[in-house]
Image (cartoon, rainbow, N blue to C red):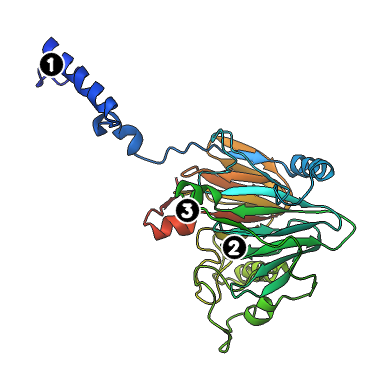
């Protein structure tokens, strides 16, 4: 080891031999000295391995359709879900180090059998209807939940769930899970359920919606939720989301507060029993930019995946930039600056690992 400090003597040949022997002893003992690693272990700012990445809906959907013609759904594969793999994370099927995103495709009259896992999941529907996801409420009672355009559907960890397509046409949607986080923590558990569906009911409203989907009203006689870490409401309907975003922009027009920034409305999907995030490890939001809007450039500690729900615009993530349209997905690595602009207006769904960073005291946001 040499030094450029004029106040420190250069090591002698004997000292250099001793240092070589010391480092060899460290390696043999499976040890690594901090002074050779601190730049990588404690960087001055996040240095994510994941990279900004865009996945086009026009590419994803045809590939999912091809998989639908060739790959069956059933025991073994369980789901026809195709993950979005970040090229900065080779050897994984991860969108970011903490978030997993996939397009799931269910063909006409197909059924996906029941299973459950520790990993928390949601489904977001950019188009289509006719599929019901059956999810147990944590009390062993399965609730049939309709999936429609613009809806956010939750599957909390260790809740049995299955899907059925009741129509003669296929349907695709986006799955989001915390698979990478759970894998890093070595906390994964998975169980198979029965091959036959627990219910073939197709109600317009699920029981959890009838009980919990009333704004500002908590059901006094409801049994305590199975877990306070996940919302007992498992369906957030587009008509409510749309109305809330429109109201924010109308209030802005009238000179009242409510928007995130000029022309930018946003809502967070929350747990009606606690007012916290709807899921313990992932934050879900919907954003609306009115025509002619450009957001401020913001960077956040933690990563996110966005899907354009409607409209079009231009997205800048770090040094990358893309024109985006309906269905397109992109990921924002930790501490990468994000800016979105649109001429004609844009709605976008966002999910992130924000709750984890906040719970651990690692959350940080900055406008460069």
Q: Evaluate whether residue 243 shows in this view.
A: yes
Residue that mark 2 sits on: 266
Q: Quadrant of residue 116?
A: bottom right
| Along the viewing direction, whichever of 72 and 168 lies nearer the viewer | 72
Q: Position of residue 214 (x, y in %)?
A: 64, 81
> Helix, strand, or loop for circle 3?
loop
For the C terminus, the quadrant is top left
Q: Quadrant of residue 230?
A: bottom right
Q: Earlier in the sequence, mark 1 or mark 3?
A: 1
Q: Which mark, residue 73?
A: none
Q: Position of residue 182 (x, y in %)?
A: 50, 51
| Along the viewing direction, whichever of 41 and 113 lies nearer the viewer | 113
Residue that mark 3 sits on: 187
Residue farthest right in this picture: 168
Q: Is residue 316 above or below residue 366?
A: above
Q: Is residue 243 above or below residue 80?
A: below
Disc 1 versus disc 3: nearer the observer: 3
For the N terminus, the quadrant is top left
Q: Who's the residue at 56% across and 67% down the image?
A: 278
Q: Evaluate whether residue 150 shows in this view.
A: no
- In the displayed structure image, the side of residue 131 where residue 136 appears, left or right: left
Q: Earlier in the sequence, mark 1 or mark 2?
A: 1
- Say if mark 2 contacts mark 3, CB within 8 Å: no
Disc 1 versus disc 2: nearer the observer: 1
How far is disc 2 from disc 3 in space, using C-alphas? Answer: 33 Å
> Helix, strand, or loop for circle 1?
helix
Q: Position of residue 109 (x, y in %)?
A: 86, 58
Disc 2 versus disc 3: nearer the observer: 3
Residue that mark 1 sits on: 15
């Amino acid at each position: 080891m040499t030094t450029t400090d004029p106040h420190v003597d250069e090591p002698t040949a004997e000292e250099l031999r001793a240092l070589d022997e010391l480092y060899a002893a460290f390696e043999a003992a499976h040890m690594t000295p901090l002074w050779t690693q601190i730049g990588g272990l404690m960087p001055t700012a996040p240095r994510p391995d994941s990279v900004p990445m865009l996945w086009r809906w026009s590419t994803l959907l045809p590939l999912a359709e091809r998989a639908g013609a060739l790959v069956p759904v059933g025991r073994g594969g369980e789901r026809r879900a195709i993950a979005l793999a970040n090229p900065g994370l080779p050897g994984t099927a991860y969108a970011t180090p903490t978030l997993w995103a996939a397009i799931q495709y269910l063909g006409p009259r197909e059924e996906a059998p029941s299973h459950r896992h520790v990993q928390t999941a949601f489904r977001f529907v950019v188009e289509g209807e006719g599929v019901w996801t059956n999810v147990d409420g944590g009390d062993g009672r399965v609730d049939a939940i309709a999936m429609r355009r613009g809806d956010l559907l939750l599957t909390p960890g260790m809740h049995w769930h299955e899907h059925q397509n009741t129509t003669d046409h296929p349907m695709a949607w986006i799955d989001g899970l915390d698979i990478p986080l759970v894998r890093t923590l070595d906390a994964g558990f998975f169980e198979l359920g029965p091959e036959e569906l627990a219910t073939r009911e197709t109600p317009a409203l699920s029981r959890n919606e009838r009980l919990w989907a009333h704004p500002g009203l908590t059901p006094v006689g409801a049994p305590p939720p199975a877990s306070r870490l996940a919302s007992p409401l498992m369906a957030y309907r587009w008509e409510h989301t749309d109305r809330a975003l429109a109201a924010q922009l109308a209030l802005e027009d009238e000179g009242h507060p409510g928007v995130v920034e000029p022309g930018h409305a946003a809502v967070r999907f929350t747990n009606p029993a606690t007012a916290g995030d709807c899921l313990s490890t992932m934050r879900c939001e919907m954003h609306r930019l009115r025509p002619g809007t450009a957001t401020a450039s913001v960077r956040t500690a933690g990563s996110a995946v966005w899907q354009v729900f409607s409209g079009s615009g231009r997205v800048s993530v770090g040094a990358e930039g893309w024109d985006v349209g309906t269905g397109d997905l992109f990921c924002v690595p930790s501490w990468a600056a994000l800016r979105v602009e649109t001429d004609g207006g844009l709605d976008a769904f966002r999910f992130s690992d924000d709750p984890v960073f906040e719970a651990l005291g690692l959350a940080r946001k900055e406008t460069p």
